Image (cartoon, grey):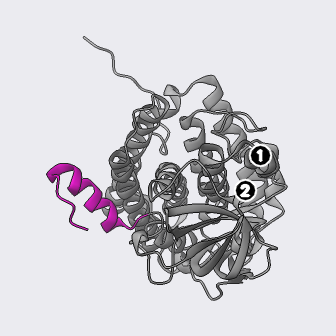
Amino acid sequence: MATQDKRKLDPMDLYEVRAELTEEETMVQDSVARLVDEKVLPVIQKAFESHTFPKELVSEVAALGLLGSSLKGYDCAGLNAICYGLICQELERGDSGIRSFVSVQSSLVMFPIHAYGSEEQKQRWLPAMAKGEAIGCFGLTEPQGGSDPSNMKTHAKRDGDDWIINGSKMWITNGNIADVAVVWATTEEGIRGFLVETNTPGFTAQEIENKFSLRASVTSGLFFDNVRVPDTNVLPGVVGLKGPLSCLTQARYGISWGVLGAAQACLSEAINYTQERILFNKPLSHNQSIQQRLADMARRITTAQMLSLQLGRLKDQGRMTPTQVSVAKWNNCRAALDIARDARDILGGAGISAEYVPVRHMLNLESVITYEGTETVHQLVVGKELTGVNAF
């Protein structure tokens, strides 16, 4: 007869995902967790309230090798996909804005330079970006485009050995603090990627104010008025939507892990609150309805963890597909947002205060479930895989 295991499970890790990690993966998670606990959490509430990005954290993040962590060479850490996922998870446990900064720098700027750039471009930008000495942004989304990047209006035309870029981009993370923008534009050859240094004449960035989500992140509109860049600033290794879409696949992978951190932070807060809050002469945690809601949060987190863990293994084996990424981004963002909303509700009146984390994560996740592909986009990606029919 089998003996019953009396181990006390970690409420944030019911299926013991951590036990499946390698020594390096565990070390990476622990080091990022310490950074979040010691550097991010003490400042993030004020940053969120004041609508400011805590730029002083860039050097701390860079010192741990978290920028471009999955890339090999060029002073990058060369970590595996599971490590990158854990980095995103721990950073977003702090705040989506901090994870967004790292995602953009790593997956949307450094990745395309590494994958499609010339050797000169790689040497020029990647070591500086890994050290946090240069910051990048990714210009794809346009005011009229959103989920339809093929409807791109920004265009570039050859002029001798240069290109002239005109157009605009919207909802660009890091826009006003970037040194270089990876800008996607239509050309006679197809969609091309351009490295536009932000001090180039004709380039302007305008920060988007009055956001009630991702307030600890810089979000901007980018404008190009006859911006002249040399042909050496074109990414030579890709033509067409494959370029930007491959970047989004990398970012979506990290997001599928990142939102787990936000969900865990909300569940942890809800558990602590219900154990301390006395209602009708007993702690809230003694109520069946509260236990059912907490259990449902833990179930959603556990499911999401298993999805991301397997997705990371597929990525490390070179077998990950965009459809698989869509499943995880769709499922995990929905789970995290629902958890944040329910945790906010469980906290009652206290739930609307930024003194507690759920409302901040809830507001942030409203953006995270939208960017890098809305929920509907990912549902249609999976639907196309199932039916063979493109219903976009």
The amino acid sitting under disc 2 is Thr
Horizontal and vertical percent position of residue 257? 50, 48
Look at the numbered disc 2 and give the secondary structure of its residue: helix
Horizontal and vertical percent position of residue 327? 33, 51
- In the image, 358 versus 145, the foreground residue is 145
Label drawn at residue 232: 2
- In the image, 226 versus 77, the foreground residue is 226
Horizontal and vertical percent position of residue 378? 33, 60
Q: Are marks 1 and 2 in contact (CB under 8 Å)?
A: yes
Determine the image quadrant of residue 192: bottom right
Which image quadrant: the N terminus? Answer: top left
- Residue 196 seen in the figure: no
Which residue appears farthest toward the left when viewing the image? Answer: 387
Label drawn at residue 262: none
- Residue 238 placement, left or right of 59: left
- In the image, 13 versus 309, the foreground residue is 309
Determine the image quadrant of residue 341: bottom left
- Sequence-first disc among 1 and 2: 1
Specify the principal SS of the magenta part: helix
The correct choice, above or below, for 277 with respect to 61 in the image is below
Q: Residue at x 59, y 42 (%)?
A: 84
Which residue appears farthest toward the top when viewing the image? Answer: 1
Q: CA distance from mark 1 to mark 2?
A: 9 Å
Label drawn at residue 120: 1
Look at the numbered disc 1 and give the secondary structure of its residue: helix
The amino acid sitting under disc 1 is Glu
Q: Residues within 10 Å of mark 1 (few under 14, many from 20)?
A: few
